[in-house]
Image (cartoon, helix red, strand yellow):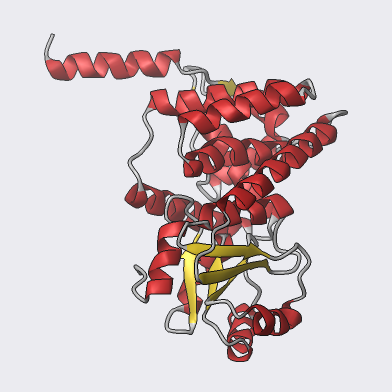
Amino acid sequence: MTELAAASALATAALTQEELFPIREVSRLTGVNPVTLRAWERRYGLIQPTRSDSGHRLYSQANIDAVRSILAWLERGVAVSKVSKILQRNETQRAVSEPAPTDALSGEWGEWQQQVQRAVSGFDEGRLEQVFGQIFACYPLPVVFQDILMPLWQQLLQRQREFGQTSEWLFLDSFLRGRALQRLQLARSAACERVLLAALPGQCHELELLVAGVLLSNPEVTLNVLPLGQPLEELTLVCEKIQPQLLVLFSNHPPAADFARQLERLALTVDCPLALAGEAAELASEHLAGSAIACLGNDARSLSRRLLQLLNGHMDT
């Protein structure tokens, strides 16, 4: 057998072994009805299931993950017609910033998620603490949050239709908020460079803000995360008192029509540079190009590096 034939045989075997789900099961797992799933495929090309010999749609785990990602964007107010472009952009940026994870590595992350899920389903904080510690011992911070914990948190957030599921999400959310606060306290330094991180009102959950703070933290920077609900119009006063070298605004929602103008007005009232992080930074980057507002993006692996580059005056574009 030639090397090409052997590789083809291995690929075929891998596809055969991959678990595939019928549309009814995908609907049960995600809460999206079959009619909508078909429309997302035919009209928007958002998901591409395979077909059985009899022509029935079969969905991989990657397809199911894509459905959950689509739901997350729709819940943030993004029109379904724009979701495809966002997903493609995120995949492109991720491919540039990091090597694609191998199937084995993705499988490892899934196994850790299953362990976390079992601990959450049992409301077993001791076991959850143990698994949490093991994950941190095995992976760097960006992988821990971006690839393992936050995707599961997002799934539980979207899956609250059945009895007990809201309690599971609240249990995990409370646990992760506590651990993120601990990481922020441990990361505090006496560095001269002081950075403020604030959420745009109503634009994210508290955990998302805290995780952004953890990922932005660096020994060269003193990072202060302002409480969720910080009024935008009072940031001028806060900056006047604290005198940071940089104010970072965080948002995971699509920007409104006057978003760029609103930020530019704020930039004129604070005595420090202004930056934007989160999904909003990705969505608004074109509108803010050439303005006084820097976009740090939303990639966990590059947030801290880009923050330091901005403070040093030479951020990558």
Q: Is residue 313 visible?
A: yes
63 vs 237, nearest the viewer:
237
Name the outermost residue toward the front: 190
Name the outermost residue toward the bottom: 268
Does 45 appear above or below 16? below
Q: Is residue 284 visible?
A: no
Relative image position of residue 223 (x, y in whole percent): 58, 63
Relative image position of residue 103 (x, y in whole percent): 40, 26
- Picture residue at 59% right of the left edge, 44% below the top: 69
Which image quadrant for residue 151?
top right
Quadrant in the picture for the C terminus: bottom left
- Picture residue at 73% right of the left edge, 77% below the top: 232
- Picture residue at 35% right of the left edge, 13% below the top: 13
Relative image position of residue 142 (x, y in whole percent): 48, 44
Does 121 appear above or below 302? above
Q: Number of callouts in the render?
A: 0
Image check: 28 left or right of 19? right
114 vs 68, nearest the viewer:
114
